[in-house]
Amino acid sequence: MATLYLSEQQSFVKKRDEYLLIRYQDKRTVEVPIHKVTQVVISGDVTVTTPALHLLLERGIEVCYLSMYGQFRGRLSPPVAKNAFLRRSQHRAHIDEQQALHIARACVKGKLENMRVMLMRANRSLQNSEIEDAAAAIRIMGQQATTATTIGSLLGIEGNGSRSYFGVFDKLLRGSLPFPGRRRRPPTDPVNAMLSLGYTLLHHQVSSAIQVVGLDPYVGFLHQPRHGRPALALDLMEEFRPIIVDSVVLNIVNHHILSERDFEEELGVVLLKSSARKIFYAKFEERLLEELHHPHFGYRTNYRRCIELQTRLLAKWLTNEIPNYPPLCIR
């Protein structure tokens, strides 16, 4: 089971029995069995017929629409889980200061710990004192997050941790692509372009898990809700950013999979070319399918499944089935 990425421009997708028939502009055709698809990501000018969309929705498969360059445009989702009691518990926890603080602390601590481990892993071979210092600083910030008493202070700790992490991120890169520091809106270099695209894809994965479990994606704990902001998705993304997206980017750069010629600039924004996006999607999917030992459940599973498991752990905490929400922290 995998995500189907449709990024070749002017492709046409229709239903054929229990298959999706994809016809490309050069007349090539590919049949994809519907039972092998968990999600669909459409990038740019791709036409999907109504019967094909109906088949996807009937099978509970979500469709994510991106622009040609990877910016999120919208989502077509099957009906949400009808668990009103779970959502009511979520809304109550959101307005309860101590409960909201519990989840917010876990989100920040998980992100900081995974950033620290990413740095320490890389530094086994690099032996760089700046990386070591950044990892030590992030460790202290993780301890501060555990005892933080306000959401505002947690956001400050998270911001400081991210600055320390990205302040040495360039030292983890062994390829030819430069990294001037984190630039979000807009990305102004290839590494930031890949990070931004990766976080968009991760957001879709987390949002899909929230949909499956039956939580409200717009009611968060660390990220406060505002109109159109999927606050819970942003919360649950935090612990996965370093270990999924950043890991993919490091793999691509350090193995020289993409180079400067795979990117283009448009109105000051650096973007991946079509061929490069296909490669990035493939590497992102590889990471999602990579297995690890889940520290809470004690068995091996892949990163995609971990996203859903963490969402279910949050639901269990909200309904008082477990005493704490444990973020996924790698070793």
Image (tube, rainbow, N blue to C red):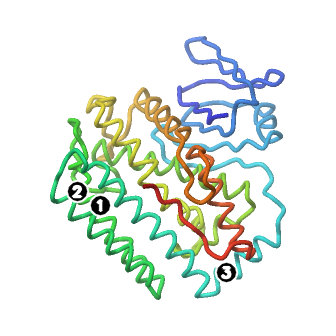
Q: Which residue is mark 3?
A: 93
Image location of residue 150, percent across then percent down: 47, 86
Q: Quadrant of residue 139?
A: bottom left
Instruction: Indicate the amino acid at tag 3.
Output: Ala
Element at label 3? helix
Q: Looking at this rendering, what residue extends furthest in the top direction?
A: 27
- Asked if the residue at tag 1 contacts the one at tag 2, i.e. Cβ–Cβ closer than 8 Å, the answer is yes
* Residues at marks 2 and 3, CA–CA distance in whole angstroms: 36 Å
Image mark for residue 144: none
The residue that appears at 18% across and 51% down in the rendered structure is: 127
* Residues at marks 1 and 3, CA–CA distance in whole angstroms: 31 Å
Image side of residue 127 versus residue 250, left or right:
left
Instruction: Indicate the amino acid at tag 2.
Output: Val
Task: Count neighbours of disc 2 (C-alpha within 10 A) and say few if under 14, some if 14 to 19, many if 20 or more.
Answer: many
Q: Which is nearer the eye, 45 or 100?
A: 100
Q: In the rendered image, which quarter contains the N terminus?
A: top right
The residue that appears at 37% across and 42% down in the rendered structure is: 249
The answer to whether 44 is drawn above or below residue 152 in the figure is: above
Q: In terms of sequence position, does the residue under pointer 1 or pointer 3 come before the other?
A: 3
Q: Which residue is mark 1?
A: 165
Q: Which residue is mark 2?
A: 168
The answer to whether 8 is drawn above or below residue 86 in the figure is: above
